[in-house]
Amino acid sequence: MSTTVIILSAAVFVALILNLAVKSELGDFLTGGAAFLAMAGGLILYSLAYTELDQDVPLAIVRTLYAVCGMFMGKNESPTVGNCAVLKPLWTRLLFWFFHVCALYATASAAIKTVGERAMRRLRLFLLRRGRLVVIYGARADTVSFGQQMLARRKCSVVFVDEHPDPSCIQTIRDSGCVLRTDRAATTPGRAFLNSVGVYSGTGRRISLFALQQSEAANLRFARGFLSALSAQSVSPDHTDLLLLGGEQIIGDSLQAGGDGHGFGNVAVIDEAGLSARLMTGYFPPSKTLKFDADGKAEEDFEAMIIGFGHGGQAALRSLVMNGQFYGSTFRATVFDPKYESLTGRLYNDFGEIFTQYRIDFHKADGRSREAYDFIRESGRKLKYIVIAAGDDKANLELSEELRRFYERRQHRPLIFELSRRGVRKIGFSGEPDKMLTIFRPEVMDGAGPDAAAIRLNHFYCGDNGKTPEQNWKECSYFNRMSSRASSDFVPSMIYAAGKTPQQVLDGDWNLTEAQKENLSRTEHLRWCAFHYAMGYAAMTEEEFDYRAEEYREEKEKTGKSSVRIAKDAENRRHACLIPWEALDALSAKENAVTGGHVDYKNMDLVNVLAVPKLIAPADIPEEKG
């Protein structure tokens, strides 16, 4: 009998621990309520009783306080006050014991909650040793929401690491079944941290790190420390992924696994504004704002307005440049920002070609100014896209609401967006709700998922080399990965320009006329050039080409072969193909005269066009949002 009681009592106690640990909001409410009732009720009843027993008021107060404190330690003064007038009625005696039970419950709940949370944390740490491990560096509302979605969508374990987590998120992390680590062993990760989450030497588990702090420096420091710990544990790069909020390509190059096997297997370095801009042009491509003829040639120019030119506005411009080039169309962007001159130094220095190759006008005026609305009115139907990136939600809201009211009374309505670090909001008209797309979602940020089309495209470029798409992607340089991403992002626009739907192409309908092939090839070349300009490339001069050609000849004479790519100088960001499409045949002939090869740069654009059916899958085509 005693054994049964012990077992049942232990089971109930464990159930209480888990319930109080997981259902914390209700537990905290009940504990607080019980403590309040115990104090209030105890003060009333004991003060009345001791006032009757002691004629000395100060003594009665002291004894009352002592008795109320004793309630929370399981004591009661029933033998002393039981015969007082206030406790003679049955209902007051019931209240007396009810208040004592409340006090004991409050004390026990606090103790059980502490023990329960420790037990739950140990249990979750134990469970982290199974399945895919997701480590999220940075605990705030948006990253916690992302972790919850990962936990719901994937068979994985999620651990948050943060020296100073957002206090409002701590309990949410615990309630969701994740683990929060704030200790030094986790924030400066080493082998001890990896062992604690079940990562041992030579493990075959999938390990994904999301470095999502607001500070790029903090993310880089943690990612490098985490990488060192993985290397010390001999974890293969094949089993590791990294997504880092940063923004610099060189960071990706330094963290991606190379020939020495040191690095993360799959690396994506992004900045929130850049990802928001990619999301915007992915779900709402500029191509959908234009008309194309039956031969795939654009019949309209693309014109965009950008309000605010901080990180968001600059990211929007680069994304629009890369996705807004079509044969037959002229690209124009107009920027309104009173402080644009103080914000564009690095953009002009590192990506200056976009300002020489495309018409980009600047106005030192606010988006609410008369100058801005004069521009909007004069542009009329030519204005296809308006991006609001004022830098904070309040300013974005004010600007978008004014534009909404302005266009509600007009027939032509361009696409209007609010761009922020969290994502992009498309403004609706005539009762249509706004559409918010956040970046902190697994389908946007998780591993190779967003890169599925890019991985297929890169594999296509690699040809029949006997390797899997994943193996070719692993060996792909970080810049070439970005190139593949940009190319795959443009595939839906290529399909739209051809007058087809993604489903038609998936069903095998990609039979293009000769005119369509040429026009789409021209568009592909414009897109390719725009990507390189947006990445800081410039056209190679004839002198630079001749110098590299001579380097090629000298190396080939000495070794019998040469690694020099005459047309591309990656170190100085120069490319000979950044010329009009019509001039590509002459460039091909010039290079072939040096190498004896058969390169055909114009045909490369056509190959990309014809490959479209091999590059898409149903999941690659964004859901129609416009």
Image: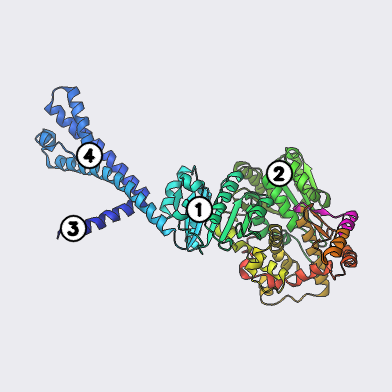
**Comes first in the chain, label 3 or label 1:** 3
Magenta segment boundaries in residue numbering = 534-548
The CA distance from mark 4 to mark 3 is 24 Å
Viewer-proximal residue among 248 and 363: 248
Residue 145, numbered circle: 1
Residue type, numbered disc 1: Ser
Residue type, numbered disc 3: Val
- In the rendered image, which residue does mark 3 sit on? 5
- In the rendered image, which residue does mark 4 sit on? 73
Residue placed at 46% from the left, 51% from the top?
192
- In the rendered image, which residue does mark 2 sit on? 309
Residue 319 position within the rendered picture, expressed as x and y whole percent measured from the top left: 71, 54
Residue 166 included in the magenta stretch of the image: no
378 versus 82 height, above or below: below
**Comes first in the chain, label 2 or label 3:** 3
The CA distance from mark 4 to mark 2 is 63 Å
| Residue situated furthest front in the rendering | 558
